[in-house]
Image (cartoon, rainbow, N blue to C red):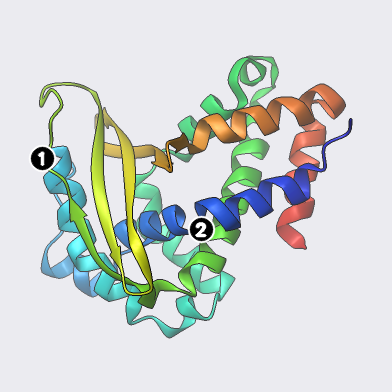
Amino acid sequence: MRVNVQSSILSFSLQRWGTALLLMAATLMVSGAALAQAAPDPKGAPNDFVQAVADKALQAVKGDAAVKRGDLKRINQLVDELILPYVNFEKTTRLAAGRYWRQASPEQQKALVDAFRGTLVRTYSGALSSVDDVSRIEIQPFRGDPNADDVVVRSLVTRSNGPAVAVDYRLEKTAEGWKVYDLNIENIWLIQNYRNQFAQQIQQSGIDGLIKALNQSNTN
């Protein structure tokens, strides 16, 4: 049975991942003024790093009317300026593509990263319209190995119009410091979900077919 990747990816993301991506955006989108006041230390403890960013970011995002309107131009600007330093989109895409990543040419790999990034940004635009529903992001005590290079930071998000939501962030330690590359909500990891959908589309129409499908969904 043919899978409509355009609708399945976006509908799943907006319905189940909307809150998680909102939290990721709220955690990582920081205004220039907020960064100037207290820049997070990407080489510090991972939970302290995420909490420091979250405390400044939530207020900054709530104060941005263009973001709450779903202005893609503004959201793209914030992603380019403020999210990219903290997120490894390439690793997220590579792991989502799985074994097919190695079969892609460098040009296809870059195109796939750009297309997948566009899908996530469009999801931000839908989720951020409800940013006022988030009242608090509480980072849970870190229970992992503080010397590990790959860790999970757990958070509990309090909402004004619904139950609290547990969201986990997976981070890797790089030469530049910690970077987020995966997140979990309702016991489903983002990469794992997309890996299944990517595999179905690639089996049907190849890497180029997946790139085309993502780009088409990004313009709808």
The amino acid pointed to by label 2 is Gly
Answer whether residue 82 is visible to the viewer in this image: yes
Residue designated by label 1: 44
- Give the quadrant of residue 38: bottom left
Using residue 192 as the reference point, say whether residue 97 is left or right of it: right
Say which of 81 and 47 sits in front: 47
Q: Residue at x 15, y 56 (%)?
A: 52
The residue tagged with tag 1: helix, strand or loop? loop
**Quarter of the image with the C terminus in it:** bottom right
**Up-down: is 36 above or below 5?**
below
The residue tagged with tag 2: helix, strand or loop? helix
**Up-down: is 182 above or below 115?**
above
Location of residue 203 in the rendering, given as x and y in whole percent from the top left corner: 81, 22
Residue designated by label 2: 18
Which numbered dot is residue 32?
none
The amino acid pointed to by label 1 is Gly
